[in-house]
Image (cartoon, rainbow, N blue to C red):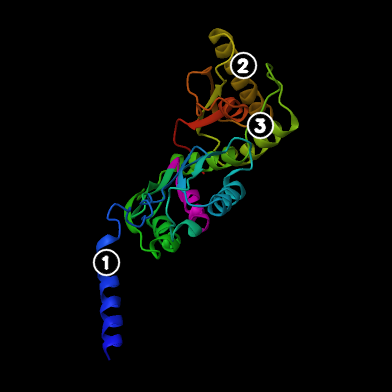
């Protein structure tokens, strides 16, 4: 009995000694650093889709880019990728659904955007009817169903005018097929003429509408030369239209490099700035 008591007392003493002697300077267990929320911003303007933000994985980025190219990337430079994959960004339930809602931007006229800050989704742009707005809100559901709060800044044109409708259709054609020229000339290759033929079919339905044909160049070259080249190209488009029997009142204007669409210093960015734009200047038939 005595021996058992001695052993029991020794065990208690060792336990107390261990508790007192454990070094108190040992660091506490490490905790993982807090992660930032994922973000996403898509902006579609005059047929060019710009993607920005920080995503949690290469998989989500690849899915978004693939869908963007399918929808808006028929012409080089139409999709600008500024997305980043950041290991400091936490997982996001909505990231896998972004590619499914990119088509909503196609319902916008002139400009539309989707902004996700991790907690909410801000949807803005102009659509041509209340019905189009209802379609957009319905198609954005895959994102709101992941818990994002929707901020609706979409404006619907209640009574779209004939010129509004025509301008939208002109923009749609030019967003998928540009009017190209051989370098430093006013000569159009077959691809450029094919785009003009699409525009001719549309303009025949609005023969009394006044149209401005605007020529634009990139920033390289002398400003005066670029101005003259852009004007000559606009005139070449006007002459092509007239030679195919169009009776619209056409005005050819050269803007040179004064109105760039892209500031990206890449071949695609420069090509994006070398363009022809059509602007409706008067109401006509459609």
The total of numbered circles placed on residues is 3
Which residue lies under the disc numbered 3?
245
Distance, label 3 to label 1, CA atoms, is 103 Å
Is 233 included in the stretch rendered in magenta?
A: no
Which residue lies under the disc numbered 2?
232
Q: Residue 157, how many percent across, how many down?
A: 36, 48
- The mark lying in front, picked from 2 and 3, is 2
**Secondary structure type for disc 1:** helix
User: How many residues crowd mark 2 within 10 Å: few (<14), some (14–19), many (20+)?
Assistant: some
Residue at image location 48% in from the left, 18% down from the top: 258
User: How many residues crowd mark 3 within 10 Å: few (<14), some (14–19), many (20+)?
Assistant: few
Nearest the eye: 275 or 201: 275
The image quadrant that residue 110 belongs to is top left
Q: Does residue 285 appear anywhere in the picture? A: no
Q: Is residue 130 above or below residue 255?
A: below
Q: Is residue 166 left or right of residue 75?
A: left
Residue 62 circle label: none
Q: Residue 182, how many percent across, how many down?
A: 71, 22
Nearest the eye: 57 or 9: 9
């Amino acid at each position: 009995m005595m021996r058992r008591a001695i052993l029991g007392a020794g065990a208690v003493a060792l336990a107390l000694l261990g508790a007192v002697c454990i070094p108190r300077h040992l660091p506490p267990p490490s905790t993982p650093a807090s992660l930032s929320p994922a973000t996403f911003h898509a902006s579609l303007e005059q047929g060019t889709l710009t993607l920005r933000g920080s995503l949690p994985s290469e998989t989500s980025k690849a899915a978004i880019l693939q869908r963007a190219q399918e929808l808006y990337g028929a012409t080089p430079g139409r999709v600008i990728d500024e997305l980043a994959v950041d290991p400091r960004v936490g997982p996001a339930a909505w990231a896998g659904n972004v590619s499914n809602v990119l088509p909503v931007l196609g319902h916008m006229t002139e400009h539309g955007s989707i902004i996700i800050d991790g907690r909410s989704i801000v949807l803005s742009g102009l659509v041509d009817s209340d019905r189009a707005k209802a379609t957009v809100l319905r198609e954005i559901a895959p994102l709101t169903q992941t818990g994002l709060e929707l901020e609706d800044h979409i404006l619907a044109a209640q009574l779209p005018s004939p010129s509004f409708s025509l301008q939208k259709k002109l923009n749609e054609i030019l967003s998928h097929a540009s009017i190209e020229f051989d370098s430093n000339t006013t000569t159009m290759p077959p691809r450029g003429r094919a785009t003009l033929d699409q525009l001719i079919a549309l303009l025949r339905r609005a023969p009394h509408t006044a149209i401005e044909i605007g020529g634009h160049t990139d920033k390289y070259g002398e400003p005066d030369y670029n101005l003259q080249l852009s004007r000559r190209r606009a005139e070449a488009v006007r002459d092509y239209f007239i030679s195919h029997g169009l009776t619209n009142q056409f005005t050819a204007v050269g803007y040179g490099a004064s109105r760039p669409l892209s500031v990206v210093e890449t071949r695609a960015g420069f090509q994006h700035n070398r363009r022809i734009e059509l602007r409706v200047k008067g109401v006509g038939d459609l």
